[in-house]
């Protein structure tokens, strides 16, 4: 896959993942939503580490700087 996630976007995704796991772990939301938050956190971590987001590809978004 082509890289389309920039460094700032990666950090933001990791921060969102940490917050989602914290909220789910502490039980701040109702039980079925815990699993949704864990899934969102997992997706955010995976796309951050891979540097590629399938939704960005579909919509043509690219936050990665182009090297010349």
Image (spheres, grey):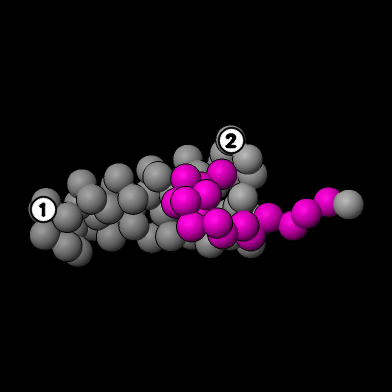
Count of marks overlaid on the render = 2
Image quadrant assignment for residue 60? bottom right
**What is the magenta segment's predominant secondary structure?**
loop
| Of 52 and 37, the residue lying toward us | 52
Q: Which residue is mark 2?
A: 1
| Range of magenta residues | 52-67
* Farthest right residue in view: 68
Give coordinates of residue 64: x percent, y percent.
68, 55
**Relative vertical location of residue 6 with respect to residue 3 in this rendering, above or below:** below
Q: Which residue is mark 1?
A: 31
**Relative vertical location of residue 22 with respect to residue 54 in this rendering, above or below:** below
**Relative vertical location of residue 55 with respect to residue 30 in this rendering, above or below:** above
Give coordinates of residue 15: x percent, y percent.
48, 59
Residue drawn at point x = 23 percent, y = 50 percent:
36
Residue drawn at point x = 78 percent, y = 54 percent:
66
* Farthest top residue in view: 1
Residue drawn at point x = 47 percent, y = 40 percent:
46
Q: Is residue 4 left or right of residue 54?
A: right
Image quadrant assignment for residue 51? top right
């Amino acid at each position: 896959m082509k890289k389309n996630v920039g460094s700032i976007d990666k950090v933001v995704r990791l921060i969102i993942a940490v917050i989602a796991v914290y909220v789910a772990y502490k039980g701040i939301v109702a039980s079925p939503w815990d699993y949704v938050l864990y899934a969102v956190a997992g997706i955010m971590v995976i796309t951050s580490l891979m540097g590629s987001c399938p939704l960005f590809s579909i919509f043509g978004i690219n936050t990665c700087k182009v090297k010349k």
